[in-house]
Image (cartoon, rainbow, N blue to C red):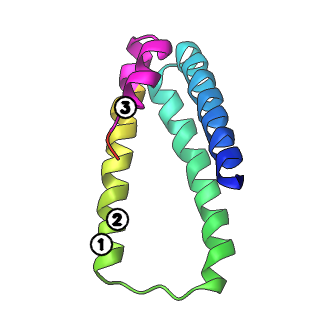
């Protein structure tokens, strides 16, 4: 039952995120939005790394390669999504992109 509550929480947070991002893009444009988005992502990533690094040992192997490639695809998809979001209605783009497989 916990997974259901957490899943609903994620859906709500992502919905709020998409809505707020669309509002922000309409006001400042996609280029500034990407700069702000990635700047905040860097800060949060540094905090996550600082928290997790003492708890683990990094190893470079095939699994790490898959994660790096997946991250590159995810970031590329996000940039395309942001560009489309700037030009189209969020109510159309967000549900449509949620249909991706897996």
Whichever of labels 2 and 3 marks the residue nearer the N terminus, that label is 2
**Structural crowding at the residue carrying mark 2, measured as other residues with C-alpha within 10 Å and reported as few (<14), some (14–19) or many (≥20):** few
**Picture disc at residue 99:** 3
Q: Position of residue 45 (x, y in %)?
A: 58, 60
What separation in Å lies between label 2 and label 3 (alpha carbons)?
Answer: 23 Å
Q: Quadrant of residue 72?
A: bottom left
Tell me if residue 49 comes above or below residue 74 in the rendering. below
Q: Are marks 2 and 1 in contact (CB under 8 Å)?
A: yes
Judging by the rendered image, the residue that carries numbered circle 1 is 65
Q: Is residue 46 left or right of residue 93?
A: right
What separation in Å lies between label 2 and label 1 (alpha carbons)?
Answer: 5 Å
Tell me if residue 22 comes above or below residue 59 in the rendering. above
Judging by the rendered image, the residue that carries numbered circle 2 is 68
Callout 1: helix, strand or loop? helix
Asked whether 97 falls inside the magenta stretch, the response is yes
Residue placed at 61% from the left, 64% from the top? 46
Tell me if residue 7 comes above or below residue 15 in the rendering. below
Q: Quadrant of residue 26?
A: top right
Q: Main secondary structure of the magenta part?
A: helix
Callout 2: helix, strand or loop? helix
Q: Position of residue 28 (x, y in %)?
A: 56, 19
Residue placed at 53% from the left, 89% from the top? 57
Residue placed at 69% from the left, 41% from the top? 9
Q: Position of residue 65 (x, y in %)?
A: 30, 72
Q: Is residue 89 left or right of residue 77?
A: right
What separation in Å lies between label 3 and label 1 (alpha carbons)?
Answer: 26 Å
The range drawn in magenta is 83-100
Q: Position of residue 54 (x, y in %)?
A: 65, 85
Callout 3: helix, strand or loop? loop
């Amino acid at each position: 039952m916990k997974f259901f509550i957490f899943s609903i929480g994620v859906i709500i947070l992502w919905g709020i995120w998409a809505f707020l991002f669309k509002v922000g893009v309409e006001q400042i444009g996609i280029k500034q939005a990407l700069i702000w988005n990635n700047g905040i992502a860097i800060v949060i990533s540094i905090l996550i790394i600082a928290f997790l690094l003492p708890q683990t040992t990094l190893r470079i192997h095939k699994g790490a390669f898959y994660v790096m490639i997946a991250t590159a695809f995810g970031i590329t998809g996000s940039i395309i999504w942001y560009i489309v979001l700037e030009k189209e209605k969020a109510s159309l783009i967000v549900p449509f992109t949620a249909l991706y497989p897996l």
